[in-house]
Image (cartoon, helix red, strand yellow):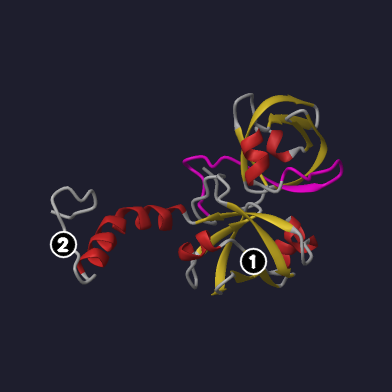
Amino acid sequence: MFTGIVEELGTIESLEHGRLRINASTVLEDAGLGDSIAVSGCCLTVVAQGDGWWEADVSAETLARTSLAPSRAGDVVNLERAVRMQDRLGGHLVQGHVDGVGEIVQPVPDLRVRISADLLPYLVEKGSVTVDGVSLTIVTPYDDGFTVAVIPHTSAVTTLGTKKPGDLVNIEVDVIAKYVERMIRPFTSAAERSSTPGTTLRASDPDEVV
């Protein structure tokens, strides 16, 4: 679990044969093999480390669902260690499980991101969203994405300040919103069926609320 507060900017050294090597320092201060580090919002496991670098195995699934696939040597990424129970939760609850890849439409400070339609229901005004591992507050949800206001400090200490239109970013929506949607789905499904003319709920209906 993470907070979406970036601790350090790391530099990709290589991505070959499913092994990612990143140059960093701060996130390695107390990191050990098996620890989790978020790389631009993608939770990865430390499998090797040395003086000023660490490595993670990146699966085909991760490459397919995140913006890591086109990464090249020299690319800068946002890094955050997993949160400790005694830490302040400065952002929001971030899993590091990327829900999709968004596209930058407008750069900071009024950052606008286009995302896929299936993620739109989880966006609300003043709600939380994670962009490349950065916890942000939604200003305006649109029918194709959202805008967030990025302050100068965040622009300076994360990769968001360098993003330009057309760049891809990792998106993670608020996990609480996903849980709420899952919990109320049976109720909304039952209500929709009962309001449809000629539709009768039966005991065999899996979503029937008793």
Q: Is residue 80 left or right of residue 191?
A: right
Q: Residue at x 69, y 33 (%)?
A: 29
Q: Residue at x 52, y 45 (%)?
A: 95
Q: Residue at x 20, y 64 (%)?
A: 199
Pointer 2: what residue?
A: 200
Q: Nearer the viewer, residue 33 or 41?
A: 41
Q: Name the spot of residue 86 as percent of width and height, x first.
A: 48, 42
Q: Quadrant of residue 91?
A: bottom right
Pointer 1: what residue?
A: 114
Q: Name the spot of residue 25 as percent of width and height, x first.
A: 76, 37
Point out the frontmost of discs 1 and 2. Answer: 2
Start and end of the magenta stretch?
A: 68-89
Q: Residue at x 51, y 59 (%)?
A: 118
Q: Name the spot of residue 139 as percent of width and height, x first.
A: 56, 74
Q: Quadrant of residue 27?
A: top right
Three-letter amino acid code of the residue under disc 2: Thr
Q: Is residue 85 left or right of residue 151?
A: left
As drawn, 63 above or below 153: above
Q: Nearer the viewer, residue 63 or 178?
A: 63
Q: Name the spot of residue 157 as percent of width and height, x first.
A: 74, 57
Q: Is residue 87 magenta?
A: yes
Q: Nearer the viewer, residue 17 or 107?
A: 17
- Asked whether residue 37 is in view, the answer is no
Distance of label 1 from label 2 (alpha carbons): 40 Å
Predominant SS of the magenta segment: loop
Residue at the limit of the structure toward the front, as seen here: 198
* Element under disc 2: loop
Three-letter amino acid code of the residue under disc 1: Arg
